[in-house]
Structures are given as structure tokens and as C-alpha cells.
Image (cartoon, rainbow, N blue to C red):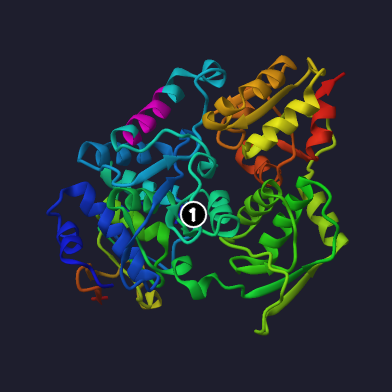
Amino acid sequence: MHLTKLEERTLEGEHGWANQIAMKILVKLGDLFGATKLIPVQSAHLSGVSYKHMGDGAIEFLNELADKGGRAQIQATLNPSSFDPEYLVKRYTKERFGKQERILASYGKMMIQPTLTCTPYYIQKPQAGQHLAWAESSAVVYANSVLKAWTNREGSPSALAAAIIGKTPNYGLHQAENRKPNALVKIEARMKTETDYGILGIHLGKLLKDKAPNLVGLQGSDDELKQLGAAMASSGMTAIFHTMAHRGKEKLESFSVEAKDMKEAAASLNTSDQNPDLVFVGCPHCSEREIKAIANLLRGRKVRKDLEMWVCTSRHVKERRQNYVDTIERAGAHVLCDTCVLVSWIKDLGFNTVMTNSAKTAFYAPTLNDAEARLAPLKKCIQTASNP
Amino acid sequence: MRGLSIKDKVLCFPSGHGSTVGSYVLYSLVKKGYGPKAIVNQVADTVVVVGAIIAEIPMVDQIDINKVTTGDTVEVDGDKGTVRIEG
């Protein structure tokens, strides 16, 4: 990989240990994946925030990096944390609170914004063609596929390194030829709800692994495509999909998705027929439009006493839609910012069965939360969670 | 390998796999004094590469690790990317 004189000096340690480590990560990954140089990125978005998924080694590393001068050179944002400061924080031990706070303090010192959301694109929407270094697989797919920005699927350390250096190696999806479709998928099944898009995503992720498919002529709202991408990136290594109406001239590997594929995928995402003790909407974090839809469905209803309903979103979206948030909270649901089910310890809060409209959550809850999953569209979730 | 110590050993294995946390585990091992002296891989992957960098463990890849047997003396040059097996 070709480096500028300045980059060389950073690599040799002239700009301190933190910059050197960050540069080493970028250069080594660049060499590994065939990059030719580093290119500037508009923003970095970091996973690796919730203490639940991090372990103590990460705390030490982040602390050392912050102490030794690691500072973000570009706009850098953070994924959700293991609790919110209003509701969940009161229900956890001091130890977990302290460790989570240390992680957030280190990122804070490194000038990384505590956005604590998996949907940074609602706070600042990247432009088509801008290069980014984003971790959080659902945001990566959304950025590449819906917003047409350019990012690889970063891990937590490589996104952090990109934040500190302000650059990323130019391999993978930073090259136009790697963004082109290399598989065609005809969707024969009917897509009725946002949950159908998630189910489709789980099926496609397993089927296509890390391919860049064209889902020929598939139509869906941004929120539906958000569900699709989040699910694809959970069951597979997908980082981009297309929905072009034309099949293109090249002969590509072809697949079709039938109603029976959808049925099978849906069955795998419903691990229980027990009544849920938690109904959860907001994976990925709710958009303003979704908050409005939830409020409209919940208006005049009351959440049942034998369960909880959580609606997770970013602080940014909550503040912009406070009137709808009030409606949701009046109905007895909790609107939580900064966190979600997957990154918090719901089992320790006594929840055993989660009903959700998110296929990503249904896919992960049995392993990440040791909980049973029930997948249902938003309307059904709200009918289950509340009474008129 | 369960139960074996990798402290001060040259750790040879085909390739890494898994989530980012794996990188931090390597860092943590070194900080606690239980880290390997060096890592030799057949194929490098993101998790191990990043782990070796942040933990400052010399690492070499593209090595046919079938030529190495547990207990061999192995010399690793992380800068040149070479491995010498002394048997």
C-alpha cells in the first residue's frame, strides 16, 4: 500500500502511540485486503459500546488509547449502550454501571459523540458517493444500499482507527467494481408488512453469505428496507444490496424466493408460542415515521399490566417527535433512548419471551439474550401488548 | 487446546474467526502477562490481525502451519514476515 510521508511518520510513531496503533490497524488491514492507499472518510460510526458485548480487555484498551492521545479527527458516532440513564440504569448493578461508564468516558475523551444509536443516518444523513468507515452492520447496509454512500463493514477497532486517522484503506466497497450486483434474486413471495422484509432478509443472508445481490424490482419504504438490510447482515455477511428493476447484461448467479422459503424463515424466527413478557419495537432504532405509526396505533389504548412494552430510538428522533413520544408513554409503553434489547441484559430483568417486529432481534434474542423470540408485525405487537 | 497455556509460546493456528471481542481478548491476555510471544497463521483474518496490533504481538501469516508440531522451536521475525522452524 502506498503511504504519504505524513502517514509513514504516523506509522513510525512520530505522532504518538495512539495514532501509531490506529495507523497500523488501517495499513495492515489495507495490505490484507489489497488496498492501494488510504482515502479520507466523511464520518466513522463505532460499534463496541455496550459493556455486555465488550469484556474487560476492551475497557483497558480504550482507556489506554484515550490516555495516550487518541482523538477523533472526523465526525464519529457511537452505537447503543447497555442501558439508558432514565429507566434501565436503575435496574442494574453498580459494577455494570461503573464499567459501562468507563467505556463511555474513554470514547468521550477521544471526542467521539455519545449518540448511542444504531441509526446515525437519522442524525446526519450521508450523501450518495461519500466514503464512510462504519461499523454496526445494519447501518452499513442501509448506508450502502438505501443512501448510496460507500462503506465497508468495519469492526469496532477499525472504525475507531478510521475515526482517529480520518481515513480508511480503499479496498472492498470503496471500489466501484465491488459494489456492482454479483447475484440476481427474484422475489416471488408477497411482501405485506415490515416484518416480511425482515424475514426475507434472514433468508437472503443465509442464502447469499457476502454477495452483493440485485433484488430485482423489489419495492419497499426506507423503513422496510432498513428491516431487510438489518436482517440480511445478521444471518449473513451482506454489506450492500440493490433493488434495480433491470437485470443488467451480465450473466449472474440467480436465485428466487418463494412463499415456502418465507414460511420456513419465519418459523425459525418464532421459537415459542408463550405469551411475551416484553414487546419490543425499535431494532434498528425507530425513525420519526415509525414513532408516529406506533403513537397512532397506541392512541387510546393501555399497555397490559402483565408485560412491558419498549420502543427504542435515538435521543435525536425522540426530541423531534416529543408529541408522539408523549402519546406512547401515556399508553404505558417505555420509550428508551441510548439502548435496545440486544445490547442490554433483559434476562436479568426477568424477561423470558420477547415479541418484536424486528427479524434481527428475533434472530439474535435466543443467543444474545437467552430469550424466546416471537416475530410479528407492528400492528400485532401493539394488539398483543395493549388493550383498548 | 482447552486448558493449555499459551504464555510466552509461539501460537500457530490456521486462521482466526469470530467477533471483534476476540481482538480485545488478545490485548487483555498480554496486559495480564499471559500473552503469546508471537502468532503464526496460515491465513490472516481481521480479528487476529487487529488483536496482534493492539496487543503488540509479532505476527506472520501465509505460513504452511502443517510443518509445525507442538513443542517445536520456532523463530518468528514479525518485521520481515519470516518463520524459521528449528524442530
The reply to whether the magenta stretch includes residue B1 is no
Residue at horizontal 25%, vertical 62%? B58
Q: Residues within 10 Å of mark 1 (few under 14, many from 20)?
A: some
**Left or right: A133, with B10 as reference point:** right
- Which of the pair B73/B29 is nearer the observer? B29
Residue at horizontal 85 percent and vertical 36 percent from the top:
A273
Q: Examine the rendering and report whether any part of residue A11 can be seen.
A: yes
At x 65% / y 84%, what residue is drawn?
Answer: A250
Q: Residue B68 in the image: x percent, y percent?
A: 35, 74
Against A344, residue A185 (above or below) is below
**Residue drawn at (70%, 62%) of the image:** A204
> Circle 1 — which element?
loop
Instruction: Find residue A251 and report its image quarter.
Output: bottom right
Whole-percent x, y for residue A51 in the image: 46, 34
Dividing the image into 4 quarters, which one contains the N terminus of chain A? bottom left
- Position of A14 relative to A212 (above/below): above
Q: Is residue B8 above or below residue A387?
A: below
Observer-nearest residue: A316 or A229? Answer: A316
- Picture quadrant where residue A219 is located: bottom right
In the rendered image, residue A325, in percent from the top left (x then y), is placed at 65, 23
Residues shaded magenta: A98-107
Q: Residue A353: in sight, yes or no?
A: no
- Amino acid identity at mark 1: Gln
Q: State the residue position of label 1.
A: A127
